[in-house]
Each structure stands twice: as C-alpha cells, then as structure tokens.
Amino acid sequence: MDKNVLMGEMTWNEYHEKIKNGKSVIFIPIGAIEQHGYLMSLNVDVVLPSAVSEGVAYLVNGIVAPTVVYGYKSQQKSGGGNFYPGTTSLDGSTLVSVIKDILRELLRHGARNFCMVVGHFENYAFTVEAVDLVLR
C-alpha cells in the first residue's frame, strides 16, 4: 500500500497511477478559519477534517485533495459570528463555485469516487449544492 495519500505531495504521474482505474476515493476536506474561543486556534475546522481524511485515506489507499481552508460565514446561532477578529469567510456562492470547480477538475483527471469531509457546520448546504450542480 502506498503511504503517500496527499495529492499535493504526489507527482502528477503518481497521482495518475492512483486514479487511472477510477476506483480510488478522493477525500476533499472542507474547513473554515474562524474563532473557537480564547484558547483554540482559528484553524480547528481545517485541522479536523484534514486529519480524518488523511487517516481514512491511508486505510483505503485513497487520496486527500488539498483542504479548502475558507468556509461560509460563521453563524451566531452555532457559537460564532463574523464580528470576531480572525474569522475570515466566503460568500455562499463563492464556496459553491470553489467546490464545484475542484470536483470538475478532479473528474477531468479521471477520478470518479469522492468523499466530502466537512469540518464546519455552515458549509454543509453549500457543499451539497456544489455536488448537485456537478452531478447535473
């Protein structure tokens, strides 16, 4: 089993070898940069889906695409809010476009199996919308 699962650290031909049969799962971690209280870093929602993706990809000989580090606006109802310094957000339409473009490019490469690993609650609806648009 190949120990390198990070797409960004592969050469193009290593990547091609892993996806050419259409069976490799590509994990796409989607996070956010936002406040998490006084004692936690801004990248919690980036680190968690990235680590989970890497661990599972290693077990199934998958590939982890580079993490989408910015996410939709942190909402006050879930403990966040854009008024905290450091919280850096995308508009929903921007996030949909980014995910849609990434999926289209991976499909163009020959990949056919994807696992979206969302680490920021507010990203779910926009991730589903992007996948739906690509499937159409």
Image: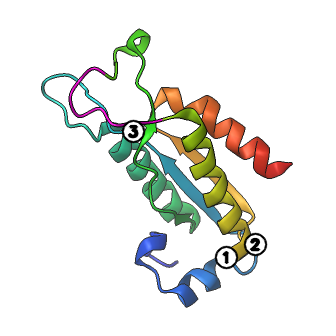
The stretch of residues the image draws in magenta is 83-90
Question: Circle 2 sits on which residue?
Answer: 22
Q: Is residue 85 magenta?
A: yes
Question: Circle 1 sits on which residue?
Answer: 19
Along the viewing direction, whichever of 59 and 23 lies nearer the viewer: 23
Q: How is the image coloured?
A: rainbow
Question: Circle 3 sits on which residue?
Answer: 32
Which-is-in-front pick, marks 1 and 3?
A: 3
Left or right: 113 with respect to 77?
right
Task: Tell me the kind of residue under disc 2.
Answer: Gly
Would you call the spot at circle 2 few (<14 residues within 10 Å), some (14-19), or many (20 or more)?
Answer: few
* Marks 2 & 3, CB-CB < 8 Å contact: no
Along the viewing direction, whichever of 28 and 25 lies nearer the viewer: 28
Which-is-in-front pick, marks 2 and 3?
A: 3
Main secondary-structure element of the magenta-colored stretch: loop
* Marks 2 & 1, CB-CB < 8 Å contact: yes
Q: Which residue is drawn at the image coordinates 20% and 37% (left, top)? A: 41
Circle 1: element type: helix
Along the viewing direction, whichever of 69 and 89 lies nearer the viewer: 89
Q: Which image quadrant is residue 133 in?
A: top right
Q: Which image quadrant is residue 36 in?
A: top left
Question: Whole-Å distance between the Cαs marked 1 and 3?
Answer: 28 Å
